[in-house]
Every structure is written in C-alpha cells, then in structure tokens.
Image (tube, rainbow, N blue to C red):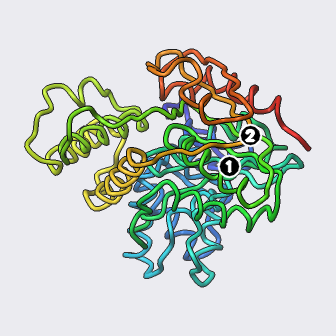
Amino acid sequence: MVLASLPLTPNGKVDRKALPAPDALRQESTRAYVAPRDALELLLARIWEELLGTGPIGIHSDFFELGGHSLLAMRMVSLIRERLGRSLPVVSLFQAGTLAELASRLRQAPGHVSPLVPIQSGGSQRPVFCVHPVSGNVLPYLELARRLGPDQPFYAFQAPGLEGERAPLGTVEAMAATYVEAMRGVQASGPYRLAGWSLGGVVAFEMARQLEQQGEQVEQLTLIDAYAFDQRPVEPVGAEWIAARFVEFTGQLLGLPVSELMADAHPADEASLLGRLLALGRRTGVLAQGVGSEQLHALYRVYESNLRALWDYQPGRYGGRVTLLRASETHVPTGTDGGWGALAAGGVEVHELSGDHHSILRAPAVDVLAETMALKSSP
C-alpha cells in the first residue's frame, strides 16, 4: 500500500499499531489483527504468506477469503508435510479456515478423511447436503452457502481421491451410497434436503432414490443445471479429449481466460494439456509457482473417473419431486424438464437462471438460486 506518510510515535519511530490493514486483509473480517502465538502458528503464517503473496497474516486470517483455492490448498498441505513433518487432509481447510483453527487441528492426531465437508455447520434450519460437481471439489459452493445465510447449515461432499488417500469412486451408485452413509453421521434420519450442481445433481438424485428405498423421506431435491439425458460424446473419445474438457472446466473454476487457454490447443497427450493449464495459471498469478503437476494430476484423475461414472449411469424411477434450476444458456435437447419428468413421479419444478453453466453459481444469479432454495426451507 502507498501512504502519504508513515504514522509516528511521539519519539519519532514508526507506530505499527496505527498502520492501516493491507487491502487484502481488510476483506477478511473486522476482527483485529492478532499475531501468531507460538512456533507452529508462526510457521503456518509464513507458509500462507508465501502461497498467497500477502501479509502480515494473523491467527484470525481466513485462507479462502485471502484468495486461496483448491490447488493452493493442496500445495499448502504438501508444504506442511515437508516443513512440519505432519500430515493433514485438504478437507481440513474447509473445517478450519482460519490459521488458529488449522494450527489446532495440526496438534491433534490425524483421523479418518470424511467426504463430508461442513462449510457452514451453525444454524437452526434443516441442513442442506450438496454434492460436488465433476471436478470433485466443493469450492464452487462457498458463495451459495454464504447467500443462504448464517441460519442455514450447509454441508458438501468432496470426492474421495482428491487427497491421494484412495482411488476415486467409479460409479454414481457407489458415490451415492458412500455419501448417504456419511450424511447419516450428521443427520441420522429424514426428511433430507439434497442438492448438487452438474454431476452433483445426478448423484443427489441417486441418493434420493436410495434413501427412498430405505424408507426415508427427501423433503427437497434441488438439481442445479444437472440433466438426465445421455451426455456421452457421439464418437468414442480418448484421454486427450477428456484432458481438454478438464482443462476447460478447471480454467472456468479458477477464473482463467478460457479462450486463451484453449486457443490452438492441439497437443498430442494429456500431459501437454495439463502443462498448458499449469503454465497459464502461473503466468496470470492464479497459481503460485509452488503448485506442481502432482496436485494437478490428482484433480485430473478424479475428474476423469467422475466423468466416466456420469456416462455409465442409468437413472431409475424416483417417487418424489425434483426442482431443476437450469442455466438459460445451457442447451437441453430433452426439453425444459431436463429429462427428469420421465423419472420423477412427483413431477419437476423448473426455474431458469440467467447465465451459463458456471456463472449461475456466482453473483448475481447465485442470489436467485439461494432465494429459490431458501423458499423451500423447513425448520
């Protein structure tokens, strides 16, 4: 920051307490800056400053509010393992966003990595459980969770495999069964509120079917630009085609210039495509220099597995009602109900949101999305 002059104490020294907070830190909260209190917090602060390119970072600083994202989070976990000798799942960052909370988790013994991420656990409303898109990551739902308000508990499912702890789940049915089991750990019985964007909507639909077969009630099933028609390419595709879709999808999530990213992109193999994404991300500053191919390949493996699971899924009948929130710019060959009308005995309620597949989860469309879901909220 540029200041007209530095504030001074009566004896002529710089008055550090009177310095304004840097612009990046003003966004995180109105809480006062509190410096790291021990060696662990200090080491974490240095790692954050290195990855995020900002400082000073205090114990109440929030990783995501300062510009962190999933790839930086994976790099941070690697640095923690390398420099502190401690293992930490990336999912912990969603459970412990501030530096102080993360330090507290590092002091505890590592436990089982759950696919369920509590983005917002407080509130009196019945929880919303939202399934990851094809990327496997829950980061796209942060803004939606905020817009639903502090009284709405919001949980999201992260795909196994992003942490490198196990192979990705290979079918929609397996994802649904795994997520239902994890959800019951938070809410033992229905009625349930399920949602999902893209692939997540398809998995949420299968979860509703499985819950119905178990005698449970689904109060709300919200499918966000998710469709029941066969989305496989007409011609057989190879790894290069899937890698290109991954690069395009990830570029959208990270806010990279996709037109530049995909312009004249005809490399011979997936490694070249992923390298192109990594290079552009670093050049534009979206990805730090420390983010490497290992983290990117872990995301790609989950993306490829999830995409193939979507292509192989054959949805069955569901006795309940479906709410479809569709993007106005998405081409739907099966009509306005997205193909769900033939599957949902309770009917399909359709709301159209202005924008494309990605923009409907960002302002201003996300406000309409949140309002539609909140209208159906039950205490």
Between residues 229 and 11, which one lies in front from this camera angle?
229
Is disc 2 surrounded by few (<14), some (14 to 19) or many (20+) residues within 10 Å? many
Q: Is residue 304 above or below residue 107?
A: above
Tell me which corner region of the image, top left, top right, bottom left or bottom right, holds residue 201.
top right
**Residue 126 in sight:** yes
The residue at 47%/48% (across/down) is 69
Identify residue for label 2.
320
Image quadrant where one finds the C terminus = top right
The picture places residue 84, in percent across and down from the top left corner, at 45, 78
Identify residue for label 1.
208
Q: Nearer the viewer, mark 1 or mark 2?
A: 2
- The amino acid type found where label 2 is placed reads Gly
Label whose residue precedes the other's in the sequence (1 or 2): 1
The picture places residue 66, in percent across and down from the top left corner, at 54, 45
The residue at 27%/57% (across/down) is 292
In the picture, measured across the screen, residue 123 lies left or right of residue 282, that is right
Circle 1/circle 2 CB separation < 8 Å: yes
Q: Is residue 72 above or below residue 152?
A: below
The residue at 11%/34% (across/down) is 266
Tell me which corner region of the image, top left, top right, bottom left or bottom right, holds residue 277.
top left
